[in-house]
Image (cartoon, rainbow, N blue to C red):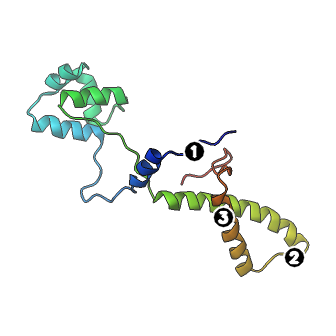
Amino acid sequence: MKRHQLNVTDEIALARLQPKAQEKFGDRSPGEWIRVLRGYFRMTQRDLAARAHISQPHLAGIESGRVDPQLSTLRRICDGLACDLVVEPRPRKPLKELLHGQARSVALARLKQTMGTMALENQAPDEELFEKLLERRTSEILNDKRERLWKTRNSKDV
């Protein structure tokens, strides 16, 4: 399988992604933002619904959180509010930390398999050596662009 190489533009875009900052006032749902903006513009739900080409009950459901709107619906509502909708991923941790953690998980699984066999033969390394082996194997995995780190197995959330 041919690996997709990142171009310079992709590299720059990835470098700009930062973990989500803890906001002082908490995150707002799309419905809350819509309600706040609509109130600021002194628009009724009926007015905004007409501008967005959706029904007023549907808008009310979105604002209350009872309805999970599609992206296309959010775009139309934002257009009705004279706003642009920006969708951008926000990593929960720094990207390098996520990648290193996943590589370490793969390395650990492989080493445990090997160490289990060695333990049966009373050849298992001590803890310090095991940690060195783990870091070395993690580094090898990270440096090998052909390594698949996210194979579908019983994968955990990152």
* Quadrant occupied by the C terminus: bottom right
Amino acid type of the residue tagged 1 in the rendering? Gln
Question: Residue 61 at x, y = what percent?
Answer: 28, 30
Disc 3 residue type (three-letter): Thr
Q: Which mark is drawn over residue 73?
A: none
Mark 2, residue position: 123
> Residue beneath label 1, please?
5
Please identify the residue farthest to the front as the structure is shown: 8
On screen, 137 above or below 18?
below
Viewer-closest of 62 and 136: 136
Between the C-alphas of marks 3 and 1, the distance is 21 Å
Disc 2 versus disc 1: distance between alpha carbons? 41 Å
- Residue 45 lies left or right of residue 88; in this view the side is left
Q: Residue furthest right?
A: 121
Q: Earlier in the sequence, mark 3 or mark 1?
A: 1
Which residue is located at x 81 percent, y 68 percent? 115
Q: Nearer the viewer, mark 2 or mark 1?
A: 1
Which mark's residue is nearer the viewer, 2 or 3? Answer: 3
At mark 3, the secondary structure is helix
Residue denoted by label 3: 138
Left or right: 156 as drawn, with respect to 49: right
Whether the residues at callouts 2 and 1 have beta carbons within 8 Å, the answer is no
Kindly give the residue lying farthest to the left in the view shown: 42
- Within 10 angstroms of label 1, few (less than 14), some, or many (20 or more) residues? few
Q: Determine the image quadrant of residue 20.
A: bottom left
Secondary structure found at label 2: loop
Disc on the earlier residue, 2 or 1? 1
Kindly indicate the quadrant of the structure image that contains residue 127: bottom right
x then y, percent, for residue 75: 29, 29
